[in-house]
Amino acid sequence: MTAASSLDAATPGLLTRGLTPPLRLADFRLAAFDMDSTLISIECIDEIAALAGKGAEVAAITEAAMRGEITDFRDSLRRRLSILAGTPATVLERVATERLRFNPGARELCAALKAAGLKLVLVSGGFTYFTRIVAAELGMDFVRSNELEIVDGALTGRVVMQDWGDVCDGDEKRRMLLQCCEATGCTPDQAMAVGDGSNDLPMMGVAGLSVAYHAKPRVREQAMVAINEGGLERLLELFR
């Protein structure tokens, strides 16, 4: 794919490809969001590791996976979780209260989309402990993420099998978006997908509008919209 071109001189840091704004928000019925580094400013697994004294080791794997250098997300997740085996589960509460912060514009964008009648999907390679908080705050209609296994008050280094599977990776994000479209009664062309890492590309690839938010280069290059400056609410500029 070619590099994204500038939308116009009045919108620095907001790039588009193959679009002719303004778009009609009424043409969309569903919006799917990644969580870590998209709706929130942190990578939760890195923050857990930092509080457990294993931050550098885990963060190095996270960054390589986000850049697409480790292409198997399941493998990268399992490698990182194995490092965290034995970490007290109380660390999860500390991350939520001390470090979890919403990215600028997350609340504004989600509120505007809900007001326009869109269904919201939170689909994350992160963990249910945090997606529950984010989903409640932003009014998500559908949620999918990984469930950390906790035994005797400590992380085991594994995830729990759920009714849909065990690991929410890029393929599962894509499946979830398509399932939510079906449940909502819309086509994938009526959905938008917002993310920042390589495991968001499968769902972004089937959505009618793909949005990269302060994303890795590989994701910016393939998205229809790249928000490189400012907050998530900048997406609304396309619809004005």
Image (cartoon, grey):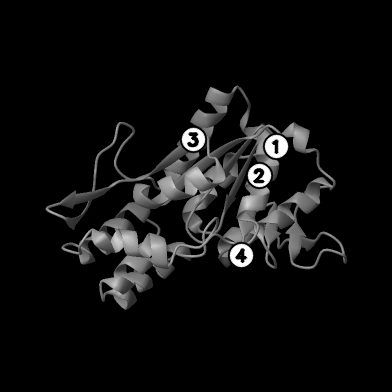
Q: Which residue is mark 1?
A: 115
In which quadrant is the N terminus drawn? bottom right
Label 3 SS:
strand
Residue 111 circle label:
2
Q: Decide which of tag 2 and tag 3 comes sooner along the chain.
A: 2
The image position of residue 10, as x and y in percent, is 87, 65
Mark 4 and mark 2 in contact (Cβ < 8 Å)? no
Label 1 SS:
helix
Mark 3 and mark 1 in contact (Cβ < 8 Å)? no
Query: Dot 2: few (<14), some (14–19), or many (≥20) neighbours within 10 Å?
Result: some
Foreground disc of the pair 1, 4: 1
Q: Which residue is mark 4?
A: 214
Amino acid type at circle 4 is His
Q: Which residue is mark 3?
A: 142
Residue 194 circle label:
none
> What residue sits 69% from the left and 51% below the top?
224
